Amino acid sequence: MQQELKSELTKQIIVDKAFKIFYENGFKTTSIDKVMKATKLTKGAFYHHYKNKKELGLAVIALKVEKRVCDSMILPLYGDGNPLEILEKTFIHRLKSFSFYDKQHGCPMNNFINEIGDFEATYQIALKSIVEKWKSALILLIERGQRENTIHKNISSQAVAVYLISAFEGIRGIRKLYNDDSILDEYLSGLTLYLKQIEA
């Protein structure tokens, strides 16, 4: 039992450090040596848990990237209340909550998509799965809003879901180019206007 706990702790340390380094420096340019140097663990500890960098990348996507998206952007969509207000709160409040560090480095999922989304089928499947879960949750919420007459019935729930995800991910990437939040403020104004337009 003690050994199992130690093993899980070791994996967690490796995944946590790998996520941070991938986020700051990119996946392709980061070596296993660099990750293990940051963990202060031996290279043997890495190979005890992961066959290669690809396995580690998939673990980071599953345990860190997906958890971030699920906790902040998917689970809130299943809450009670006015669907339009839930959309506003989830997207607008999330953007306003980002630290300077997060604004500097963008969205971890988007970074992975842009860097390795066309690189390996297994990464594509893992990343696409997160997007599809997010899209499905949005569609359910939008369709609930349509049934409850808070969101226009004559709009495509799928189109709105894809638009909201794409716009959110896009501004996270664009914000990395700026030294202040002016571009983010303009996006938030546009998003607020868009949400008003789909209100029933």
Image: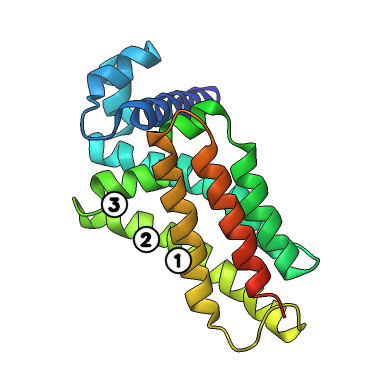
x, y (%) of residue 10?
A: 44, 23
Question: Given contact means CB atoms under 8 Å apart, are the residues at marks 1 and 2 in contact?
Answer: yes
Looking at the rendering, in which quadrant would you find the C terminus? bottom right
Separation of residues labelled 3 and 2 (CA atoms): 8 Å
Q: Amino acid at mark 3?
A: Tyr
SS state under label 3:
helix
x, y (%) of residue 135?
A: 50, 67
x, y (%) of residue 187?
A: 53, 51
Q: Residue at x 29, y 48 (%)?
A: 114
Q: Is residue 40 above or below residue 47?
A: above
According to the image, label 2 marks what residue? 128
Q: How is the model colour-coded? A: rainbow
Residue farthest along the right direction in this orientation: 81
Which labelled disc corresponds to residue 123? 3
According to the image, label 1 marks what residue? 132
Q: Residue at x 72, y 69 (%)?
A: 83
Q: Is residue 10 above or below residue 132?
A: above
Q: Quadrant of residue 28?
A: top left
Q: Residue at x 70, y 75 (%)?
A: 199
**Crowd band around label 2 with a 10 angstrom C-alpha radius: few (<14), some (14–19), many (20+):** some
